[in-house]
Image (cartoon, grey):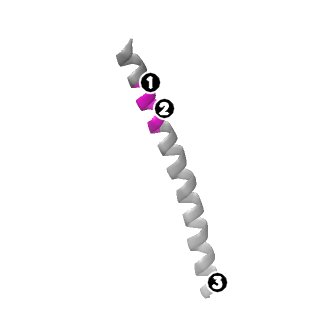
Amino acid sequence: MRYLSENFINKLLDNLIETISKRFDKKLIKKFLKSINLDQ
């Protein structure tokens, strides 16, 4: 039982980290694109 809950928590954290990193990447890309457009 303990192994199952630990495994579940690990999966949950992995999903959370993945979601956060995707959102962060999108924001970063948008900022980068804006800065390029401003420079031209």
> Disc 2 marks which amino acid?
Leu
Element type at mark 2 = helix
Q: Quote the CA–CA distance across marks 3 and 1.
A: 45 Å
Residue that carries the numbered disc 3 in the rendered image = 38
Position of 8 with respect to 40 (left or right) is left
Q: Label 1, on which residue?
A: 8
Camera-side residue: 13 or 18? 13
Q: Residues within 10 Å of mark 3 (few under 14, many from 20)?
A: few
Quadrant position of the N terminus in the picture: top left
Q: Amino acid at mark 1?
A: Phe
Question: What residue is drawn where x is 48% and y is 44%?
Answer: 17
The crowd level at tag 1 (other Cα within 10 Å; few <14, some 14-19, many 20+) is: few
Horizontally, is 4 left or right of 34 in the view? left
Asked whether the beta carbons under mark 2 and mark 3 sit within 8 Å of each other, the answer is no
Image: magenta residue range: 7-14
The answer to which quarter of the image holds residue 36 is: bottom right
Q: Nearer the viewer, residue 8 or 34?
A: 8
Q: What secondary structure is marked by label 1?
A: helix
Labelled pair 2, 1 in contact (Cβ < 8 Å): yes
Q: Establish if 21 lies above or below 11.
A: below
Which residue is denoted by mark 2 in the rendering? 12
Picture coordinates of residue 11, whole percent (x, y)? 44, 30
